[in-house]
Amino acid sequence: MSTAPSAETTRLDRWLWSARLFRTRALAAAACRSGHVRINGSHAKAAAPVRVSDEIRVRGEGRERIVVVSRVIEKRVGAGVAADCFVDHTPPPPTPEETPGVPVRDRGAGRPTKRERRILDQLRGR
C-alpha cells in the first residue's frame, strides 16, 4: 500500500512557494505559523492540504491577498504558469487620495510644544 500524497492535494507551504506568492518555502511556512494564512476562512498550518477551489487569504505587506486555487502544483514554475494556478480576487489597493495623509513637521522644527501636542490630541480624538 502506497502512502504517497495524491496529485489532487499538496502542502500549503509548498503550494504558496510554487505559485510564487512567497519567495521561499521557509517564508511561506513562517507565515502559516504566525497565523497570516487562512484556507476557507480558518487558520492553516504549513502542512494543511490544498485542493482545487480552496480560497487562500495571505496577509502581508500591509494588505490581504485573496486567491482561489485553480490548479495544484508541487514544483516551482515560471511566473506565467504560476499565474494560471490561481484566480486572484484581491481588491485593488486604495488610491493615494483615499488614504489619509500623515502630518509632517518641518525638518529642524524640534519637538512639538505643549500647545501643538494638545492640538494633535484633539485631531486624534484623545
Image: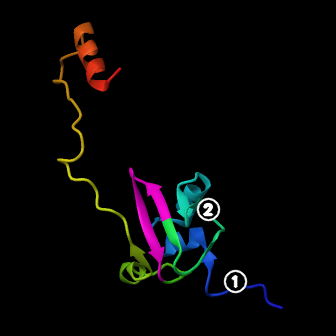
For the question of whether residue 7 can be seen, the reply is: yes
* Residue type at the position of mark 1: Pro
Q: Main secondary structure of the magenta part?
A: strand
The image position of residue 61, as x and y in percent, is 40, 52
The image position of residue 48, as x and y in percent, is 65, 69
Q: Quadrant of the N terminus?
A: bottom right
Q: Which residue is mark 1?
A: 5
Q: Is residue 46 magenta?
A: no
Secondary-structure class at tag 2: loop
Secondary-structure class at tag 1: loop
For residue 27, the mark is none
For the question of whether residue 20 can be seen, the reply is: no
Q: CA distance from mark 1 to mark 2?
A: 18 Å
Total residue callouts: 2
Residue located 62% across and 81% down the image? 9
| Discs 1, 2 touching: Cβ within 8 Å | no
Asked if residue 95 is positioned above or below residue 119 in the image, the reply reads below
* Residue type at the position of mark 2: Ala
Q: Is residue 58 magenta?
A: yes
Tell us which disc is closer to us: 1 or 2.
2
Horizontally, residue 50 falls left or right of residue 55, namely right
Q: Nearest the camera: 116 or 18?
A: 116
The quarter of the picture where residue 64 lies is: bottom left
Q: Which region is colored magenta?
A: 57-70
Residue located 30% across and 19% down the image? 121
First in sequence: mark 1 vs mark 2? 1
Q: Which residue is mark 2?
A: 44
The image position of residue 95, as x and y in percent, is 21, 53
Task: Find the residue positioned furthest to the right.
Answer: 1
Asked if residue 122 is positioned above or below residue 74 in the image, the reply reads above
